[in-house]
Image (cartoon, grey):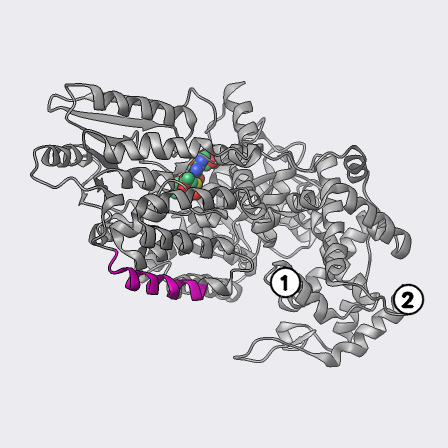
């Protein structure tokens, strides 16, 4: 949280001479300048006071600390000034470690990033059961900056420390205890008492006072330690071209081993500075902050309303989407009545749900008890009799307007008047879906991304009539099932599919210009997407793409490029993965292979479209640009039309809903790293050469001419300040 008032640090000196210093910055006790300044001041005071023998540092509430506040990280990135970090390292953590009196950390809930670093400065740590302890900085593109790379290896050994740092995975306090990171585990009720007792034990020499940075007992010999690091280095080298921070982090640990902890801390600061200011770190922090900012929606979360409880949900349709949505709901202990037309379809859907749960067991994310528990929240039905007490209905049938209209007409009658009526459509106009109901204010879109129990984005589509309460309720249930809810306006394709609609056209236009389709897939993968567009279409099937292309062409006839290729593929008996034959060949047990016998079909499409006489010759970079600049362009239209509230929301949507590389910061952030002017000029050139698909939007043109970025960086701070402090 940004700003000053929400941060509070208190000190209470107990009768036994222990000063309990508690810092509070809800909701996760992230550290920002005001809290750090207060913390430093109070710790210094505790060292000076005669009535204080030792200090216990703790977080207020049920959490210790989630690390440095993200808005502070963004401030450092914006100004390039990280002097504040050196101050914290020197004036706080070093003071905690080397001060006249011992300090003990009492950790509840979690200690992450700077939180764990602060606790490692203490001479002992007590944690609640299951508390998470970790250094997740590498997921943000930089390495720790407050001594974490030096103190962690000295507490848990080089191998475990390198593993924790490189994977960014936290350990629980129980493992932390066996590793030596934690000295004692205590229930939340006893935590403070145990920490105070431990502090007194140190004061009265019943326990040694240990300084993490001076310890060497867990490091082993220099040769052994360097050999361990070399092992990790070999693994990190494979990804070094995209993730250099892993190697840099290992170098910093190495510096501490060969030259001592102090020298390691200095090197760590230098590397932190370099990495935190890199484009990748800026991009990753931007996505993380933009994601958090989506939970503050003007006119919804600040409307003074309380979310209503959602105890029971009706899901209509047990196909791929319906079963995924149901899986997500029952995994979060929400009662679901799943409705299908008949028991055969229903059983098929329930099997899919069971398979979804078993896949989580295979991945180690759920155990058999968890499966049983989740299934106990599910009830399959084939009529609406059990819908009389549901709080929310999510319709997830096929994309057929008249079918959806009749379903909504029926649920409008059978469900209670407070029940939210949501459609899982991925693009049909919600006004049309709810046309035959008498309650437009409770109609809303709940667009999940497939597989719905895994993909984190939930696009909540509002019409002009959707009530604020309904939006708030759906946001709340979205969060409860671990989704990132994004409220968007109602238009064809909504925000995400509409923005990315050119991605379903551009690669086909390129093929019709003579660019090899397998090269297109390779280039898109090297750009950072997990799958190229042709393989994606094989996997998802062509039917959906053809239907969506028709819908886009009907709404935006002036700029939609329609390729004949999918239709031709179907005519030639190629359906993609579903029948094993598409652009790729699908064989059991092996990866999909390009099927070069598809070339005559691609040629046929080229002849039909007749865009150019001879195949064009372009570079890999131009392929990326010709595919993704039109996406940026459509995103600009979405922003201009107000379908989303902030450009950064498209970054979140592109990363979470479309797997756009987070290291590029999302589609609009990436566009800004290239520059609106270059994108505009390129689109203008291609539009003259290859048609209106590339025509630049007015918004892009305006930004290009005025030299204004498409996204306002630092959105997190700005949103929070607007909501909480203005
Ligand atoms: C110099 C140092 O080495 C550098 C650092 O310390 S960098 C920071 C490293 N720390 C991190 O990356 C931790 C990131 N946070 C998390 O992993 C998780 O938020 C958590 C485990 C702390 C809590 O998870 P959970 O309980 O599910 O809550 P979650 O929904 O994620 O967050 C709750 C709220 O806290 C906010 N928040 C979480 N971490 C934050 C942070 N570091 N700064 C600011 N706000 C934060 C979120 O915005 C969210 O706000 P909202 O209610 O308005 O949406």
- Give the overall secondary structure of the magenta segment: helix
| Residue on which the image places disc 2 | 610
Mark 2: is the Cβ under 8 angstroms from ligand 1? no
**Quadrant of the drawing holding the N terminus:** top left
Indicate the quadrant of ligand 1 in the picture. Answer: top left
**Quadrant of the drawing holding the C terminus:** top right
| Residue 299 point in image, percent of width and height | 58, 26
| Range of residues picked out in magenta | 219-235
| Residue on which the image places disc 1 | 526
| Residue 295 point in image, percent of width and height | 52, 35
Horizontally, residue 5 falls left or right of residue 399, namely left
| Residue 703 point in image, percent of width and height | 77, 36
The first of marks 1 and 2 along the sequence is 1
Give the foreground label among 1 and 2.
1
Whether residue 414 is visible here, answered yes or no, is no
Whether residue 21 is visible here, answered yes or no, is yes
Horizontally, residue 581 falls left or right of residue 637, namely left
> Is residue 220 highlighted in magenta?
yes
């Amino acid at each position: 949280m940004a700003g000053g008032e929400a941060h509070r640090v208190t000190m209470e000196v107990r009768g036994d001479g222990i000063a309990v210093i508690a810092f509070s910055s809800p909701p996760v006790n992230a550290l920002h300048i005001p809290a750090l300044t207060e913390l430093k001041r109070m710790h210094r005071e505790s060292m000076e006071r005669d009535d204080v023998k030792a200090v216990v540092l703790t977080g207020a509430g049920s959490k210790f600390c989630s690390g440095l506040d993200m808005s502070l990280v963004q401030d450092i990135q914006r100004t390039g000034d990280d002097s504040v970090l050196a101050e914290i390292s020197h004036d706080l953590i070093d003071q905690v470690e080397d001060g006249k009196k011992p300090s003990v950390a009492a950790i509840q809930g979690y200690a992450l990033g700077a939180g764990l670093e602060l606790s490692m400065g203490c001479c002992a740590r007590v944690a609640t059961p299951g508390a998470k302890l970790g250094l997740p900085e590498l997921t943000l593109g930089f390495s720790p900056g407050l001594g974490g790379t030096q103190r962690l290896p000295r507490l848990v050994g080089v191998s475990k420390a390198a593993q924790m740092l490189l994977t960014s995975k936290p350990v629980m306090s129980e493992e932390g205890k066996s590793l030596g990171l934690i000295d004692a585990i205590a229930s939340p009720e006893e935590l403070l008492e145990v920490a105070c007792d431990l502090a007194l034990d140190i004061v009265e020499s019943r326990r040694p006072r240990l300084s993490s940075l001076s310890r060497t007992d867990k490091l082993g010999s220099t040769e052994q330690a360097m050999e361990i690091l070399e092992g990790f280095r070999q693994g990190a080298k494979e990804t070094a071209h995209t993730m250099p921070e892993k190697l840099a982090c290992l170098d910093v640990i190495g510096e501490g081993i060969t030259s001592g902890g102090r020298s390691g801390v200095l090197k760590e600061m230098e590397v932190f500075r370099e990495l935190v200011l890199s484009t990748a770190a800026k991009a990753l922090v931007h996505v993380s902050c933009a994601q958090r900012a989506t939970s503050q929606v003007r006119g919804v979360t600040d409307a003074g309303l309380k979310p209503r409880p959602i105890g029971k949900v009706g899901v209509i349709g047990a196909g791929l989407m319906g079963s995924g949505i149901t899986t997500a709901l029952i995994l979060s202990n929400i009662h679901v009545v799943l409705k299908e037309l008949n028991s055969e379809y229903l059983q098929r859907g329930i099997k899919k749900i069971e398979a979804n749960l078993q896949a989580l067991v295979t991945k180690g994310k759920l155990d058999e008890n968890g499966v049983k528990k989740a299934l106990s929240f599910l009830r399959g039905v084939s009529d609406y009799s059990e819908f009389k007490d549901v709080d929310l209905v999510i319709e997830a049938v096929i994309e057929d307007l008249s079918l959806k209209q009749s379903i909504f007409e029926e649920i409008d009658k059978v469900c209670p008047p407070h029940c939210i009526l949501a459609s899982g459509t991925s693009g049909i106009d919600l006004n049309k879906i709810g046309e035959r109901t008498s309650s437009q204010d409770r109609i809303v879109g709940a667009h999940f991304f497939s597989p719905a129990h895994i993909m984190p984005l939930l696009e909540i589509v509002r019409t002009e009539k959707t009530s604020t309460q309904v939006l708030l309720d759906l946001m709340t249930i979205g969060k409860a099932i671990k989704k990132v809810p994004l409220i968007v306006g109602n238009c064809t394709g909504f925000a995400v599919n509409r923005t990315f609609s050119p991605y379903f056209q551009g690669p086909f236009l390129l093929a019709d210009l003579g660019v090899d389709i397998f090269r297109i897939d390779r280039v898109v993968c090297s750009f950072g997407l997990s799958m190229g567009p042709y393989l994606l279409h094989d996997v998802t099937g062509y039917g959906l793409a053809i239907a969506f292309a028709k819908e886009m062409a009907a709404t935006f006839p002036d700029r939609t490029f329609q390729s004949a290729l999918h239709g031709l593929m179907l005519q030639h008996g190629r359906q993609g993965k579903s029948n094993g034959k598409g652009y790729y060949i699908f064989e059991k047990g092996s990866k999909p292979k390009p099927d070069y016998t598809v070339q005559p079909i691609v040629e046929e499409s080229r002849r039909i479209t007749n865009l150019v006489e001879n195949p064009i010759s372009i570079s890999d970079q131009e392929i990326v640009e010709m595919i993704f600049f039109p996406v940026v362009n459509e995103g600009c239209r979405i922003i201009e039309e107000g379908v989303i509230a902030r450009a950064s929301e498209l970054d979140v949507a592109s990363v979470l809903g479309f797997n756009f590389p987070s290291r590029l910061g999302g589609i609009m952030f990436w566009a800004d790293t290239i520059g609106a002017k270059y994108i505009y000029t390129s689109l203008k050139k291609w539009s003259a050469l290859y048609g209106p698909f590339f025509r630049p939007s007015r918004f892009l043109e305006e930004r290009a001419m005025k030299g204004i970025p498409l996204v306002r960086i630092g959105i997190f701070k700005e949103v929070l300040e607007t909501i909480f402090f203005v």
